[in-house]
Amino acid sequence: MKKFIAANFKMHEPDLRAWAKFKPTSGAEVVMFPSFLHIPLFSGRKDTILGAQDVFWENLRSGGAYTGEVSAQMLKNFGVKYALIGHSERRALGDTNEIVGKKLKTALASGLKVILCVGEGEDVRKKGITSAKNFVRAQMKSALFGVKKKFLKDIIVAYEPIWAIGTGRTDKPADAIAMADFIRSLLSVSPTGGPVRVIYGGSVTAKNAKKFISQKGIDGALVGGASLDPKEFAKIISSVK
Ligand code: PGA
């Protein structure tokens, strides 16, 4: 299976001139998550796939009275294939486990693929890896409750320990692998064959990407800060062999 490398621009303006020169050089699946506003500017590229940083949990065919929200169907109309759901920064802004579960089910039923983000805070990790696993298990359980098995193939799980996001402190590769294996074990019910991909996120840069991406148990990376510079992001992609 191809490695999966994603760029999450968060609330940053991409340098469009620099991105016009961007050329990913590996067999990885590369997905870009610009802001909603910038989605049309990244559509139509042949070398990358389009993603959205969030999606609303209601997908009414004729639209609906939800000021400020964007539906899965609207995203699909603009060529979006993936939605990021449950990112810790969205959870910090109010996305509860229940909301994450609703968004996940709606996105999948609407034909989007999903990156489901999970990961523990520093207080939990300080208590040890078992506490972190218990925390992640609870997040997974509530997000996936009621998800039909046929949709599991459309989910990629991003393990992102919150204390590693934007801090320059990555997880230890061995711990990230243990977590990825654990997450996969929670999803072993997949009837469609093909294991669910689990990627790592949290301070991935061109310098350290290989330590994570080259691992058999880690299927790729979700890159925030280091994805803003297309040259650095291209280096991260080229560390996939
Ligand atoms: P970071 O962010 O690479 O800047 O740590 C990762 C993320 O938030 O997905």
Image: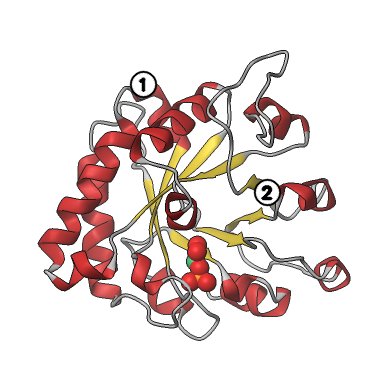
Q: Is residue 237 left or right of residue 67?
A: left
Report the number of discs. Answer: 2
Residue plotted at (70% across, 31% down): 76
Residue plotted at (68% across, 48% down): 49
The CA span between labels 2 and 1 is: 25 Å
Q: Which SS class for mark 1?
A: loop
Q: Would you name the residue on which mark 2 appears?
A: 49
Along the line of sight, the residue nearer the viewer: 6 or 216: 6
Categorize mark 1 by other alpha carbons within 10 Å: few (<14), some (14-19), many (20+).
few
Coordinates of residue 211 in the picture (x, y in percent): 39, 78
First in sequence, mark 2 or 1: give its number: 2
Residue 238 visible (yes or no)? no
Coordinates of residue 78 in the picture (x, y in percent): 78, 36
Q: Would you name the residue on which mark 1 appears?
A: 148
Tag 2 and tag 1, C-beta contact below 8 Å: no
Residue plotted at (64% across, 38% down): 81
Tell whether circle 2 marks a residue whose Cβ is less than 8 angstroms from ligand 1.
no
Categorize mark 2 by other alpha carbons within 10 Å: few (<14), some (14-19), many (20+).
some
Residue plotted at (73% across, 13% down): 62
Residue 216 visible (yes or no)? yes
Coordinates of residue 32 in the picture (x, y in percent): 66, 55
Coordinates of residue 184 in the picture (x, y in percent): 26, 47
Amino acid type, residue under disc 2 in the picture = Ile
The furthest residue to the bottom: 207
Tell whether circle 1 marks a residue whose Cβ is less than 8 angstroms from ligand 1.
no
Amino acid type, residue under disc 1 in the picture = Lys
Q: Which SS class for mark 2?
A: strand
